[in-house]
Amino acid sequence: MTADIPDQRPGLARTPSQKERRARILTATLDLLDESGAQALQMREVTARSGVALATVYRYFPSKDYLVVMALLSWSEGFVEPLWKLAAELDDPAERLIAMLDGAVDSIDAHRAYAAALAVAASSPDPLVLEAFLAFRELLSAFIRRALEGVSQPDPAVIGVIIEGVWLRALIELGFQNSNADSVKRTFARVVRLCFAS
């Protein structure tokens, strides 16, 4: 499952060598985010870690904020499929959604700086950052729709909107308030069960 980002974005990698350079940049960015967070991240550190020239980094990613959110989008695409495989064995859609959200919280909990960066990206005035964040949001929506396949009541679209709101709150709690991941999981479980109780 990949997010749908238009081909007009800066520096779209087309050749295998461009894709490899872009991947090195994204990997270096994720490593540096884990080490020092988005605020401390410097583009020169990304170039040193990735071995890609600064001009090339800026060609692919014209701002640090855009680079960060694109790195997080690529990271999040990588954990969706394994979570689905784990949850697919559950017949109850509410429990399936809870299991998937638990796995997502565990993934974010292991990378608290990612949560903070995503929460900041949600309010960015930069159109490229906003576009990339919306692609992340669509990935989350697809994640929720997949968990709710076959459900007609309660309305999966309404559940999706509710879970997206709780997810943004979870990013803030995990990224800035140092909340306990188990507490966030309990909140998700209560919200999902309330949605299905109505």
Image (cartoon, rainbow, N blue to C red):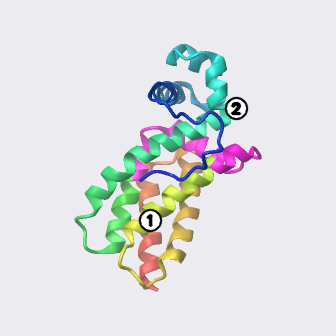
Determine if the magenta segment contains residue 156: no
- Could you tell me residue 156's position as x and y percent? 47, 76
* Side of 15 relative to 62 (left or right): left
Taken as a whole, is the magenta stretch helix, strand or loop? helix
- Disc 1 marks a residue whose amino acid type is Ile
* Depicted 120 relative to depicted 138: above or below: above
Q: From where the camera sits, is residue 41 visible? A: no
Mark 1 or mark 2: name the one nearer the start of the chain: 2
Q: Which residues are magenta?
A: 104-131
* Side of 1 relative to 117 (left or right): left
- Could you tell me residue 54's position as x and y percent? 64, 17
Residue 92 or residue 67, whichever sits in front: 67
| Residue 144 - label | 1
| Element carrying mark 1 | helix
Give me the residue at 46% from left, 62% from top. Answer: 142
Residue beneath label 2, please? 63
Give me the residue at 60% from left, 15% from top. Answer: 53
| Element carrying mark 2 | loop
Residue 107 or residue 137, whichever sits in front: 137
* Side of 154 relative to 33 (left or right): left
Packing grade of label 2 (10 A; few <14, some 14-19, many >=20) is some
- Disc 2 marks a residue whose amino acid type is Ser
